[in-house]
Amino acid sequence: MSAALQHQVKSKVIIKGHLRTYRFCDNVWTFILADATFRNEKISETLGRVKIVACDSNLIPQD
C-alpha cells in the first residue's frame, strides 16, 4: 500500500474539521475529527465523524 501511494496517487486532499481526540501510542497516531471536510480539486465531502490512524512507514517491514 505504501508503494502504491507513493507512485500511483497524484492528487492532494485537504482535510478540515474539529479535532475531538488525538493519541500517540506505540508509534501510532490516532485522530478523531468531527464535522470533517475532505476536499480535492474536483469534489468536497463533509462527514460527521472521522477516525484517522497513521503510523511511521519506516517501521513497516518491506517485502
Image: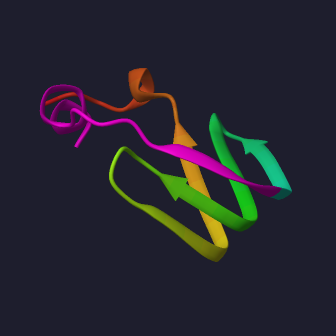
From the viewer's perspective, is residue 30 above or below residue 1?
A: below
Badge count: 0
Q: Residue furthest front?
A: 42
Find residue 18 and report its horizontal and vertical position in percent.
82, 58
Find residue 53 and report its horizontal and vertical position in percent.
57, 52
Find residue 11 and report its horizontal and vertical position in percent.
29, 37
Camera-side residue of 40 and 28: 40
Relative placement, left or right, of 41 versus 62 is right
| The N terminus sits in image quarter | top left
Residue positioned 24% across, 36% down in the render:
5
Camera-side residue of 24 and 48: 48
Q: Residue furthest right?
A: 20
Residue positioned 62% across, 64% down in the render:
51
Camera-side residue of 15 and 59: 15
Residue 5: say if magenta. Answer: yes
From the viewer's perspective, is residue 3 above or below residue 44?
A: above
Relative placement, left or right, of 7 versus 49 is left
Relative placement, left or right, of 35 versus 38 is right
From the viewer's perspective, is residue 32 above or below residue 53?
A: below
| The C terminus sits in image quarter | top left
Q: Residue furthest top?
A: 58
Find residue 61 and report its horizontal and vertical position in percent.
29, 30
Residue 25: say if magenta. Answer: no
Please tell me in which quadrant of the rendered image residue 54 appears: top right
Relative placement, left or right, of 25 versus 46 is right
Residue positioned 59% across, 70% down in the render:
46
Q: Colour scheme used in the picture? A: rainbow
Q: Residue furthest bottom?
A: 48
Q: Which residues are magenta?
A: 1-18
